[in-house]
Structure formats: structure tokens, C-alpha cells
């Protein structure tokens, strides 16, 4: 039955005390949330900390939750705000090698042909490096759009920026990534 419920219905059920509803939400969104945080702060320890803090905020807000936006938008907005707070406190210092190691662990391909694995690895690596070169605002907009499937309005809500600003950030991000891949 839980598979049939929307995220919003699950969160409302959790607010009424249904712990299984929280488990379903956590199972559905833990990977998406963690990847978003990892790409946002680029340091595994910080992503782990923010991941836990985001879910803690969800737990604390369970009785106050109102489905005014999609649950994923609300969840990512909490995570984004926590990440911005962390960045304001100190800039991350993770290197590309550490980040790539985490991506490989999260997205390790199954038994595939070695030439395809190498090609996919190279593509992921190039994308990761291109993302690291983007300004924080452009990277966040790009990740929310491409990995989380959010539209302009939802990205604007998560980031607190206007829709035209989001559109501009996405346009610049895509242009920079295309240029990086053209090299």
C-alpha cells in the first residue's frame, strides 16, 4: 500500500504517527538527497552531516508539514538551506579524487563490458569535473534539474531565486558543460 501513496500522503501519515510512512519516504529519497548534498558540498563528511541534519529537520517538522509544494521540493529546500549555511561557515576542501571515489561507490556499474565501463567512467568523470568548475548557484540549479528532475518553479522555490535567475543559471551551466565536453 505504501508504494501507492504519494510522498505528501506519506509525510502527512508520518505526522499523524505512522513510523512506516517515514521509512517509505526515507527509502524513496535517501539516494537522491545524498547525491544532491554530495554534489552541493563536494565533501563526504559534510554531505553525511547535512544528510543526517536534513532528515532530523523532517522528523522535527512532521506535525507542522503542509503539502503546499511537492515533498521532494520541500526536502531539497531544507537540504539546500543547510548546505548554504555550511558553506557560509567554511568552504569545502575536498579534492576531485575523493569526490570521484564516492561517486564510484554510489554508482558502481554492474558487470558490464570493460570498454563500456571505461567510457561511462570517463563521461562521469568529465561531468564531475565540469560540475566542480561551475559556480555554486549554477551547479545547484543544474543538479536540481538534471538529477532531481525539478522544473524552473521548483528550483526557484528550493534556492530562493527568481525563475528568470534560475533559467539564466541553467543556461550558463549547460553552456559551460557543453564547452567542457567539446574540449
Image (tube, rainbow, N blue to C red):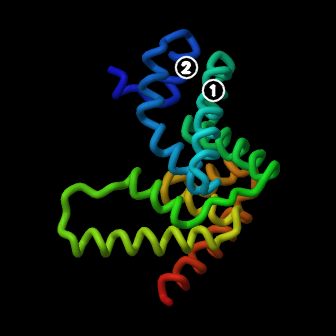
Tag 1 residue: 56
State the separation of the CA atoms marked 2 and 1. 16 Å
Residue with the mark numbered 2? 12
- Residue 121 is labelled as none
Q: At x 62% / y 68%, what residue is drawn?
A: 170
Most foreground residue, 45 or 58: 45
Q: Residues within 10 Å of mark 2 (few under 14, many from 20)?
A: many
Q: Residue at x 47, y 38 (%)?
A: 29
Residue 155: where, in percent of width, then height?
63, 53
Mark 2 and mark 1 in contact? Answer it, CB < 8 Å: no
The quadrant of the rendering that contains the N terminus is top left
Residue closest to the eye, 102 or 68: 102
Disc nearer the start of the sequence (2/1): 2
Q: Position of residue 167 (x, y in %)?
A: 66, 66
Q: Quadrant of residue 24?
A: top left
Residue at the spot x=59%, y=64% of the render? 95
Q: Is residue 124 above or below residue 6?
A: below
Amino acid at each position: 500500500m505504501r508504494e501507492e501513496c504519494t510522498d505528501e500522503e506519506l509525510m502527512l501519515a508520518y505526522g499523524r504517527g505512522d513510523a512506516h510512512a517515514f521509512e517509505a519516504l526515507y527509502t524513496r529519497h535517501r539516494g537522491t538527497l545524498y547525491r544532491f548534498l554530495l554534489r552541493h558540498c563536494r565533501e563526504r563528511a559534510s554531505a553525511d552531516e547535512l544528510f543526517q541534519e536534513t532528515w532530523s529537520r523532517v522528523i522535527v517538522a512532521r506535525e507542522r508539514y503542509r503539502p503546499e509544494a511537492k515533498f521532494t521540493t520541500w526536502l531539497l529546500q531544507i537540504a539546500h538551506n543547510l548546505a548554504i549555511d555550511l558553506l557560509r561557515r567554511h568552504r569545502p576542501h575536498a579534492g576531485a579524487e575523493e569526490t570521484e571515489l564516492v561517486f564510484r561507490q554510489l554508482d558502481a556499474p554492474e558487470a558490464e563490458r570493460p570498454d563500456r565501463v571505461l567510457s561511462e567512467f570517463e563521461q562521469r568523470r568529465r561531468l564531475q569535473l565540469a560540475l566542480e568548475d561551475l559556480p555554486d548557484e549554477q551547479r545547484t540549479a543544474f543538479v536540481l534539474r538534471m538529477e532531481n528532475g525539478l522544473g524552473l518553479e521548483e528550483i526557484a522555490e528550493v534556492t530562493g531565486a527568481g525563475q528568470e535567475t534560475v533559467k539564466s543559471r541553467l543556461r550558463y551551466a549547460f553552456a559551460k558543460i557543453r564547452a567542457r565536453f567539446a574540449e
